[in-house]
Amino acid sequence: MSPSTEIQLIAVVVAVACALPGAFLVLQRMAMMSDAISHAILPGIVLAFFITEDLGSPLMIVGAAASGVLTVALVEMLRKTGLLREDAAIGIVFPALFSIGVVLIARYAGDIHLDIDAVLLGELAFAPFDRFILAGVDIGPRSLVIMSAVLVVDLVFISVFFKELKLTTFDAALAGSLGFAPVLLHYVLMGLVSVTAVGAFDAVGSILVVALMVAPPASAYMLTDRLKPMIIISCGIGATCAVGGYWMARYFDVSIAGAMATVAGIVFVLVVFLAPDRGLLSVARRRVSQKLLFGRKMLVIHLYNHEGLPEAKDECRVEHLEDHLRWDHQFANRAVKSCISNSLVNRDGSLLSLTEDGRILARQALVEF
Amino acid sequence: MEWFTDIYLDYTLRTVALGSALLGITAGSLGGFALLRRQSLLGDAISHAALPGIAIAFLLTGSKAPLVLILGAALAGWLGAALIASVTLRTRIKYDSALGIMLSVFFGFGLVLLTYIQKMPDANQAGLDSYLFGQAAALVQRDVMVILGIGSAIMVMMVLFWKEFKLISFDADFGATLGFPIHGLDRFLTGLFVIAIVIGLQTVGVVLMSAMIIAPAAAARQWTDRLGRMIVLAAIFGAVSGVGGAITSGRVANLPTGPTIVLIVSAIVVISLLFAPNRGLVFRRVREWKAGKNLRVDAVLVDLYTLASQHSSKDYPHSQRVLDVMSTISGPAKRTLHLLETLGLARQIDAQNWSLTGKGVERAQSVIDSQYGGKLSQ
């Protein structure tokens, strides 16, 4: 495989591995836990590194997962005192843990290869040079091997506990009363987030972990109401960001991780505007059409009320709508046109009269109102 | 040469300590409002979102003057905050997701721009990185003057708009019914907040800035229920941790300033959570213990009185075992009975039996009057 293919493959695997737990974080309104955990795993990584002196050791993952779970436990502990709200607790715990990590590196790791830039920012471009060699055979880039393992763990956990996760996500109280241990599941999910974050950090850095855990699932959330499609769409969007980000980075010669986050942002903006049903454009269009529909109903009711009465000659004129219904000129004309094209109303000069369809609609609308 | 080194070091230390203290005061006091408005994590998002602004300001002007970069950072941070608010308001995306997206996407884009700047021929970009991780030790007098100027302006604004900010922190809807321009005030306060954050980026960096904002306020909140005192305390905590962090990291080799400040302010939070009067955990535990003791004393007293009222005299003795069974609150009555004895409310007749003293009878009657409405269930 060429380095270019390998980088894209790593990026896609990272993106999908992040999107899986990310979907649940977004739905459980805990998106910022990804930010907290991806920073707070630093002391775990550093301590594990001191013990093993090897960045590829499995102990790194264990250490990171442990400090991730510690973050969650500390946040929970602070919240339970009732003295701080959850967001404040998060905002205090992770900078403290991150600081401990930074201090440990600065004090005791002066000459080892572990710097904060790498943790925060990552550098995917160098990933293919770090090979995973097992029994003398070059299996692939180390990040690819590690992230594939993480992806498998994520996939297995989410498929095995799908029902439990779904229930806990949408109705934690019911899950608890049915005996599903939502608290335990919460910790396991957070452990999963930590493992994914640590697997991803040396490839893409912790900020991109946040981008990939939150942006694709949030975009998918704009597109669907169902959990399974949401997860699948998240993974798809994540993979798109990975590949798109790679090519953007290559074209402009910039940071791959940053470009992936940028593409994730672009996708999110597109989805926010263009999503069917929930996108801003679709909502705006629906408002306009609902307003027009309401206008049609008002017009036929108005005509129906005055139909056949002596004042009809005055009341049923186009110009009169502006006074009587307090419509502006433009909207009155649009409503009249819309009624005519739907053959609810006939127009004779400026005099309007109902058709049979218009009469039926007016009677229906009167009942509705 | 030694005196020269000393003065030089002292001068640096003074500059760093002063800068950190000013920063702590500004961030801490504004953080009080953020905490009350449940925007604790907004600071984190803003500090990350400011990065592309710094890069764009540099790209457009080619200047690394703190004011130029701060202006760029503030515009980007403010845009990020506005987008978070508008996405939350207009779409089904929740606040936490909006924070996460703006934080990471803006930061990622900033990273793209920074790497782009690095690749530019003869661009003198060195130093922009310090906004990422913070370099308090590199603070020079010019930076401190900028922090001082902007920080004072923020403080003046806070004092001028005190009433309005208080109103939108506690009851924005009420403020709206009074005719205050709530949205404008909200944007204004967010703007001040953004400025306070971006002037801190150079010192403590994007990751730790959120702690500078929220931790002093969270600590101060435990000591008082009054907004004014809380903000002043938060400013003091911010200043103390700024100076403490600067001095500690100046004394100890290889101890970065930003993280040290954050660790000190975190320690202040822990101390406040434990020992603050009234709200503090230790205080609460003591209060619960005292309340529990009073409850047990009263319960056993009333039980003894109830038993005695079945007999001719109010000090008729009864067995401890009966009390064990009767009492619904205290569990074994023995310890409470001894407590009653030391309080002079009951006395031990023999190994098993206890009776009320005259004082005990009075106290039992008053407890029954006040807590049982004068009536006893049999």
Image: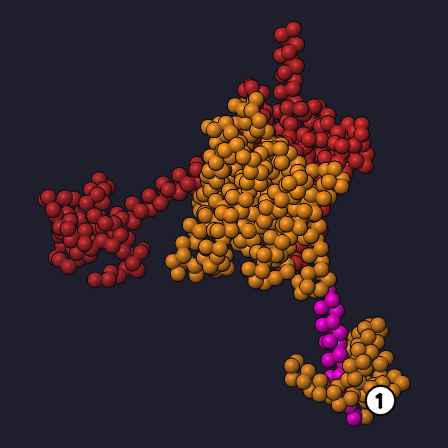
Chain colours: A orange, B red
Query: Along the horizontal axis of the image, is A66 left or right of A239?
Result: left
Query: Along the horizontal axis of the image, is A80 left or right of B92?
Result: left
Q: Quadrant of residue A105?
A: top right
Q: Which of A211 and B250 is in front in this view?
A: A211
Question: Disc 1 designates what residue?
Answer: A313
| Residue shown at the point (56%, 22%) measured from the top left | A110
Residue that lies at the very extreme toward the left in this rendered image? B350
Q: Which of A126 and B33 is in front in this view?
A: A126
Numbered disc 1: secondary structure: helix
Relative to B284, is B5 above or below? Answer: above
- What residue type is disc 1 on? Lys
Q: Which of B72 and B230 is in front in this view?
A: B72
Residue A351, image x, y percentages = 86, 86
Which segment did they paint magenta? A284-309
| Residue shown at the point (84%, 81%) measured from the top left | A318
Residue A124, image x, y percentages = 64, 37
| Residue shown at the point (54%, 40%) measured from the top left | A146
Residue A238, image x, y percentages = 63, 50
Q: How many labels does the image show?
A: 1
Q: Nearer the viewer, residue B55 or B114?
A: B114
Residue that lies at the very extreme toward the top in this rendered image? B1
State yes or no: residue A64 in magenta: no
| Secondary structure character of the magenta stretch overall | helix
Asked if one can make out residue A155 in the rendered structure from this viewpoint, the answer is yes
| Residue shown at the point (63%, 54%) measured from the top left | A236
Asked if one can make out residue B276 in the rendered structure from this viewpoint, the answer is no
Which corner quadrant holds the C terminus of chain A? Answer: bottom right
Relative to B324, is B31 above or below? Answer: above
State yes or no: residue A300 in magenta: yes
Q: Quadrant of residue B239?
A: top right
